[in-house]
Image (cartoon, rainbow, N blue to C red):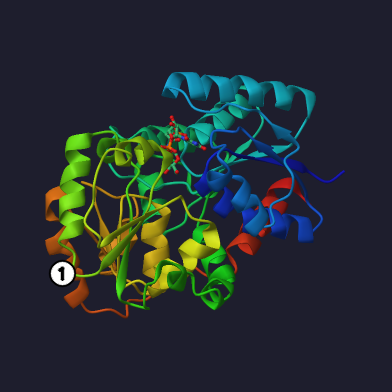
Amino acid sequence: MSARFVCVVGARPNLIKAAPLLEELANRSIDCALVHTGQHYDQAMDRVFFDELRLPHPAAHLGVGSGSHGVQTAAALVGIEEWLVSHPVDGLLAVGDVNSTLAAALAAAKLRIPVIHVEAGYRSGDVGMPEEINRLVTDHISSLLFAPTDDAVDNLRREGIADDIIEQPGNLVAQAYLTHRSRALDQKPWTRFGLREEQFVVATIHRPESADSSEVLQKIISELEAVPYRVLWPVHPRTRAYFATTSLSNNIILTQPLPYLDMVGLVSRAACIITDSGGIQEEACLAGVPCVTVRKTTERVVTVKLGANRLCRPDAIATSVEESLESTRGWDAPARWDLGVASRMTNALSRLSGN
Ligand code: UD1
């Protein structure tokens, strides 16, 4: 009998990465159920992505929702364990680095179900980031590791992980981006905001160290006000409340979290990106658009090495944007960030399961 898998998702970035892989598995008739923890639940953070990316209906929705790290991870852990006990599988695909990823990996590993970590080996070196803890633990209890870059492979080797469980099939964020780019550009999403191609900046700020501090947010806002373009800022629910009482200069356009296709189109035609998100650093790199990452460190080091991305402090955004706009473009895409990522992953899964 052929192997059965389950793929666990919980938050917006997971959905983008899971989509090409689930499609490839379905095309090759490999059985893979989808379980959604419900970590993200707003229409704009969740349902829209299911529709646009044509994700299958989840076999289970655990309704975990928001909470402290302990509460959220524990609720997902309990829910996933219950599901796994009543639905035997031969492997669990844990995607990305969110709390749901860690919970899924823990539940499966303790039930002796092989864990396959999709997006293994990224390291920022900053254990103050909850995602760094999620990545470290997930990688060290997995049976197969899909690293998105060569430096992620090096990180895993440096931590003593055996070579024979590491694969570098490329990055699913890249496959999703390349799959949807032309459809996204056809929609010209910038026109809906009154913007002209390459005459605007897209900003996303959602990490707790920025989004949860009104002092840091205020600093970021004054820097964005000094950027020589209009700035389109899709606001994560974390920062929604802050803007209810804050007035902004009119070069900043606030909007709801945007659907995937809108983001792909906007990132592709922006003059520059300002972000603290992980996936957007990768999308900007593929789009050939310079990225300014408002963080002390990044796990997407490949984008910095290529000259596509630079790190900056919240009080240095405007200067970094200026430097970015003057910088040389035309960097290469990282190795295997292409349309064959899901296919290479599926080949590895077939070998694992003897399909
Ligand atoms: C999570 C991930 C982060 C990822 C991000 C993408 C962890 C530790 N963090 O951060 O790595 O980059 O998702 O967006 O897993 N909220 C809503 N509606 C929603 C979801 C969240 O209003 O649908 C609000 C709630 O106030 C919640 C807060 O956002 O408390 C934070 O949500 P949470 O899932 O804890 O983390 P994110 O900041 O979204």
Residue 200's x, y, as percent?
31, 70
Q: State which quadrant residue 41 falls in.
A: top right
Query: Residue at position x 49%, y 35% from top?
Result: 138
Q: Residues within 10 Å of mark 1 (few under 14, many from 20)?
A: few
Relative placement, left or right, of 60 versus 133 is right
Q: Kindly tell me whether mark 1's CB lies below 8 Å from ligand 1.
A: no
For label 1, the SS is helix
- Quarter occupied by the N terminus: top right
Relative placement, left or right, of 154 versus 31 is left
Closer to the camera in the image, 36 or 138: 36
Relative placement, left or right, of 169 versus 353 is left
Q: State which quadrant residue 206 falls in.
A: top left
Closer to the camera in the image, 156 or 345: 345
Which residue is the extreme one toward the right? Answer: 1
Q: Visible in this render: residue 333?
A: no
Q: Visible in this render: residue 124?
A: yes
Relative placement, left or right, of 44 versus 47 is left
Closer to the camera in the image, 114 or 185: 185
Residue 75's x, y, as percent?
56, 20
Residue 183, compared with residue 242, is above or below; it is below
Residue under circle 1? 322
Residue 239's x, y, as percent?
34, 39
- Residue type highlighted by circle 1: Glu
